[in-house]
Amino acid sequence: MDIVEQLETRYKALTRLPEGRTPEEDKRIDEEIERMVYSTENQEIIRRIVFTEDEEEADRLRRQVFYAPDTFVSDMLHDDGREFIKEVGYRLDTVEMKYGKGWLDKEYP
């Protein structure tokens, strides 16, 4: 299996929706995630990250942000993604809403 096939296989596994979820439920969840990610409060935190000169403060703020689930999927396509996400301490609310609780700890190809 070449690298492209490996990435495609991993991507499909990472983005598999929980069994039994209806299209209506998935649409509702997507809308809720969008509200979280684009909320005024979340955008203000991101703005503060961009403009702070204090790296410790920026790190603290990064752990408060609601990120789009695809952000984590992209990180997990890399071999060290799981450790990186855990090390930084990102909030996983949105990715777990989309793909299920314990998403980060599941085994992926």
Image (cartoon, helix red, strand yellow):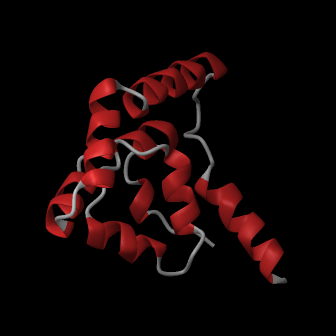
Is 73 located above or below residue 47 in the figure? below
Count of numbered circles in the view: 0
Q: Is residue 109 left or right of residue 59?
A: right
Is 59 located above or below residue 101 in the figure? below
Q: Is residue 43 left or right of residue 59?
A: right
Q: Nearer the viewer, residue 102 or 69?
A: 69
Q: Nearer the viewer, residue 73 or 43?
A: 43
Is 79 located above or below residue 71 in the figure? below
Residue name at image x 38 percent, y 46 percent = 101
Q: Nearer the viewer, residue 68 or 1?
A: 68
Q: Residue 40: x percent and y percent? A: 32, 25
Quadrant where the N terminus sits is: bottom right
Quadrant where the C terminus sits is: bottom right
Residue name at image x 26 percent, y 41 percent = 45
Q: Residue 42: x percent and y percent? A: 31, 35
Q: Quadrant of residue 82?
A: bottom left
Residue name at image x 22 percent, y 63 percent = 59
Q: Residue 30: x percent and y percent? A: 54, 27
Residue name at image x 43 percent, y 37 percent = 97
Q: Nearer the viewer, residue 30 or 12?
A: 30
Is 90 located above or below residue 66 in the figure? below
